[in-house]
Amino acid sequence: SSDQIAELLIGHAVTAKSGDKMFRFYYDPSNVVSGVLTNGGWEGSGSYAITDTNKVCVSMAADNGRFRCLTAVRNGAVVQKFDVNGKMTFELLSTEPSTGL
């Protein structure tokens, strides 16, 4: 549910995998998200929102205000995010309470 997604993400540092790339994201309680590619080469920040329909929507600075929404689905101990076409885009490997990256 959207409440469970909020509990998992807000105020947490999240390690996520997308293809062969590993990322760390931090979901600040003020609806700011920041992220880094763990082996370097990318970092960014933007805004996020969690919808009543169990989607996590993110607009990074490079998106020019456009939000991309992904559906979050728990699969055992792992949470996976899927795009509008049903393609898995991220797999959340771990979350931990944090105050930043």
Image: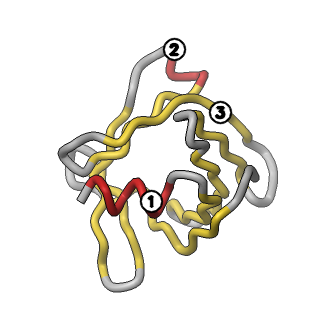
Residue 75 placed where, x, y %? 30, 78
Q: Are marks 1 and 3 in contact (CB under 8 Å)?
A: no
Q: Which amino acid does label 2 sit on?
A: Asn
For this rendering, which residue is in front, 65 or 47? 47
Give the Cα distance between marks 1 and 2. 22 Å
Q: What residue type is labelled 1?
A: Phe
Mark in the foreground, 3 or 2: 3
Residue at point 72%, 48% (across, down): 36
Q: Which of marks 3 and 2 is nearer the N terminus?
A: 3
Q: What residue type is labelled 3?
A: Ser
Give the Cα distance between marks 1 and 3. 17 Å
Instruction: Count the marks.
Output: 3
The answer to whether residue 5 is above or below residue 79 is above
View extreme (right): residue = 40
Q: Earlier in the sequence, mark 1 or mark 2?
A: 2
For this rendering, which residue is in front, 68 or 94? 94
Give the Cα distance between marks 3 and 2. 12 Å
The answer to whether residue 71 is above or below residue 64 is below
10 Å neighbourhood of mark 1: few (<14), some, or many (≥20)? Answer: many
**For residue 20, side relative to residue 41 (left or right):** left
Residue at point 59%, 53% (across, down): 11
The secondary element bearing badge 3 is classed as strand
Quadrant of residue 94 in the image? Answer: bottom right
The secondary element bearing badge 1 is classed as strand
10 Å neighbourhood of mark 3: few (<14), some, or many (≥20)? Answer: some
Question: Which residue is denoted by mark 2 in the rendering?
Answer: 64
Question: Which residue is denoted by mark 1 in the rendering?
Answer: 90
Q: Residue 45 carries which label?
A: 3
**For residue 99, side relative to residue 26 (left or right):** right
